[in-house]
Amino acid sequence: MPKVTFQTLLFRGRLPLIIGALLLFMAFNDRSFFIPENLINILSYSSINGLLAVGMTLLMISREFDISVGSNLVLSGVIAVQVANHFGAAAGIAAGVASGAVMGLINGILVAKANINSFISTLGTMVIFQGVAFALTDMKPVACDLPTFQSLAEWELLGLPAPIIYFLSVAIILWLALKFTRVGKSAYAIGGNIQGCRNLGINVDGWRIGYFIICGACASFAGVILASRLGAASATFGENVSMVVIAAIVLGGVPLSGGAGSLPGVIGAILLLGLIDSMTVYLNVFGYYQKLFWALLLIGVVVFDVVCARRENRRLELAELLRLQREPLRDNTEVTS
Amino acid sequence: MKDVSKRLAQLCLSHSIVAVLILLSVAMALLSDKFFTAANWANVLNNLAVPGIVALGVALVVIAGGIDLSFSSMLAACAALAAWLQPQNFWLALIGPLALGAALGAFNGLLVVKLGANPLISTLGTQWLFLAALFIITGGGIVQGNMEGPFHLIANGRLAGVPLPILLLLLLAAATSFLTTQTSLGKYIYAHGSNNCGLRFAGVNANAVYLKTFVLMGLIVGVAGIVLSSRLGGVRPTEGNRYLIVVLTAVLLSGVSLNGGVGSLFHVLIATVVLGVIDNGMVLLAVEYKYQQMIKGCVFILAILYNNYTTKQLAMLRVSKR
Amino acid sequence: MTPLIELRNIYKFFGGLCATNDVSLTIGKGEVIGLVGDNAAGKSTLMKIIAGVHKPTSGEYLIDGEKFVAHSPRSARNAGIEMVFQIQDMALVPELDVADNLFLGKELYRKTLGLNLNLVLDRRAMQERSRVLLHELGINIPAVTEKVKYLSGGQQQSVSIARTVFFDARLVILDEPTSSISIKETRKVLDLILQLKAKGISSIIVSHRMDDIFTTADRILVLRRGRKIEDVRKEHTSMDDIIKKIINAEKESMSQETLNQPTA
Ligand SMILES: Nc1ncnc2c1ncn2[C@@H]1O[C@H](COP(=O)(O)OP(=O)(O)O)[C@@H](O)[C@H]1O
Ligand SMILES: [Mg+2]
């Protein structure tokens, strides 16, 4: 039976601990940080990144990733706005989300069928998707002032703004899928041992394409919500979101080597990043301290995990050594007694 | 006779990126008579000097089985340091960026090699870290250097009519090619990428090899930083970011495998030139700017597909030889 | 006379798993040792400790009566210990060619500007010597410039074996060297061990094939669950005995344990 030590507790609870420490720090510094509006604001702000992250979690568990989500977000927003301007809000929203699924499909085919490493292929499609957005918009922002289009992200439920509700519902659906259905089991299995899955006759390529589509659709949903909230889309924002999202997923406990991790961890990491953002605003420090904190957090956690695993290993070894070296002695005492 | 044709096929397949360059150049020469002029080539290559040099360094790390995403911030940091030191002392402005590059490379190396952190994630972290540190140190503004004197000549001078950055790029490409093909460190870099356990079992200090690769990359980025600084005169902290995609595409396009152990520095140089020719071609053909990025992305994916195809064919040719 | 190698109370853990449990042994000069044991008995782990790959969790390791402190394959190789790893360990570098693999870590250099700077590799000399050696050993490889990844498992194993012969070894460790090579090549490997012995070079051979063990070894060790349970000269035992030790050891140790526990 694995013993629960202080170290394993520290290891498991590192994100909640960091969040707690930050909140405590804010509690001493600026009580107004805790007014509900601000907390909701953090959540609302995090829900775009959150949608991207929960969408990519399945993909990363199956040992692939997608650095084109940032461009996907941009392009689907542009498509949603332009289609909405021509054919109405509902068509725009549908087209936006569908375009993301298609982008996911393209990535999936490049990775699963054409066998290109996902880093390379999604780097390429990242450039392409943004290029398409450039071409569609002539590199100028496009606006949509249809009230129905903007109302997608306007409403509230129990005081929670719509983006949070969207984010939470997608997260819950994906969490259920991950935990209780074959969708999740296959992701863990493929991430753990893809060749083994192939040998067992699992449709590995089909699943992987599916995860890319889920990831793409979530990203475009986020893009549509963003466009609806701003009433506009531009081909030039949303750069580098992908890397933040991948970093958050890794922080949340999904290793790049796949096969492990859970959705709540990822959500925790997203909230942590949002919290840091909001804190830097509140403390009114220079904007780039936010990146600095993220960087230190990412490097710190990665190093912490490695060191923790090493020390845990060492501890197990020493404990077992002591037990074995004591054993013959115990045998003797038992015989003499 | 059959042997010769097989040799030829092998040669073509193993240098597919060269074939791409030749085809592109021929197509461009047919489409535009300005393409094959000395002035145009000097222009193309001159623009490539900075990303080309950086790509050589990044390729070394990728061949060794790692990756380093922090080069964009390293480049900006080295360039900014050069711009800051340059009015004070010419030699300091050369040594300082090199030392800084080596130190930042060593920092990445320590994270990846000694602490065993994943290179992709940890160098993403250091990319942010170096950039944020640079922002905080410089206050976010431009670091301004002199626009004259010997330092200014590095990027703007000519030797025998050839711009110095081009010579520097070719020199570094030759040096890194020599390193990887003729020396034991180069051999170990490939071996580390292909099977680091095998390298260790053979009695080589594999970790030292890996660490040296990161430091070497830092040095090379330092050189690129000097050139960049000399060209721009004033350096903004975000200056390196626009090279992020170009450098990664050049490295991957050249056939350097992310699995490590595969690739050639000569091909990296050629791949950078290919990207330059595409850029240049779109300008010469007056392709509207809004379409350029889309075209670049599609060419990249097609080239990667083609590369994968030739690699597979090459392996088939090898296996069927017996 | 001090033995070549002496291990004292070596323990090796992987996390909570004890792979080598209190093993002590000596290896004399020119001695051939056969090491047998069930799967996961810890044979490879013990051999890797001797070859410097693993650092023992506790215990002492002496070479020529002196403590071996710098646990690395490099220092073990410098001390004259060469090891042929089992196929699963993939000790060769697939992307390098045969000659590069044979000379990995012990390269030959060309003179640069008339000086021995150890800078420029002498690929031609290494290829030439590889060709000669492989020919002498009767190993059938298409070309020494072929990448190792294009070789079959057996050919790869032959290359690993050839590597140990190249340099002045004092102890050659062979971990399941005959697991995937042909009968003819197996003969050659066994001959090779006897040749080494004639030259006064010690060797350890790990194998599941009793024939291999009994044709070459002077002494036979049996490992079981990380413990050394037998260490006899070949004359004092028989194939049946050893097989019983490997297979029936469970019952024996059970009875030992029941003896030790008066309550049972
Ligand atoms: N690098 C390692 N990490 C963790 N466990 C290992 C490692 N190497 C070996 N083991 C474990 O140690 C035990 C002994 O393995 P090994 O020495 O390979 O056995 P053998 O060669 O006798 O079949 C096995 O249970 C194996 O799973
Ligand atoms: Mg074994």
Image (spheres, rainbow, N blue to C red):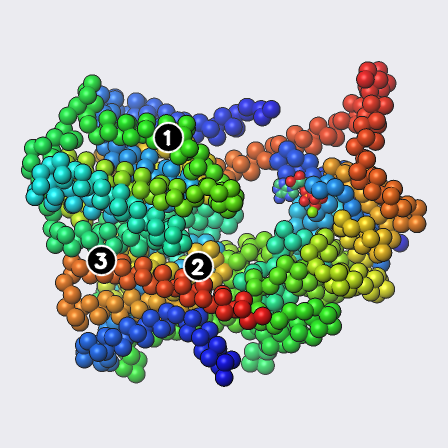
**What amino acid is labelled 1 in the image?**
Ala
Q: Are marks 1 and 3 on the same chain?
A: no
Residue lying furthest right: C236
* Secondary element type, mark 2: loop
Image position of A311 (left or right of B41): right
Q: Position of residue C123 (x, y in %)?
A: 58, 74
Is the residue marked by circle 1 packed among few (<14), some (14-19), or many (20+) residues within 10 Å?
Answer: some
Residue under numbered circle 2: B257
Residue lying furthest front: A201
**What amino acid is labelled 3 in the image?**
Met
- In the rendered structure, find residue A177 and report the number of the disc placed on it: 1
Q: Quadrant of residue C24?
A: top right
> Label 2 vs label 1: CA separation?
34 Å
Q: Residue at x 24, y 51 (%)?
A: A129
Chain under label 1?
Answer: A
Q: Position of residue B116 (x, y in %)?
A: 50, 46
Image position of A82 (left or right of A39): left
Is the residue marked by circle 3 packed among few (<14), some (14-19), or many (20+) residues within 10 Å?
Answer: many
B165 and B308: which is toward the camera:
B308
* Secondary element type, mark 3: helix
> Label 2 vs label 3: CA separation?
24 Å
Chain under label 3?
Answer: B
- In the rendered structure, find residue A316 and report the number of the disc placed on it: none
Residue under numbered circle 3: B294
Chain under label 2?
Answer: B
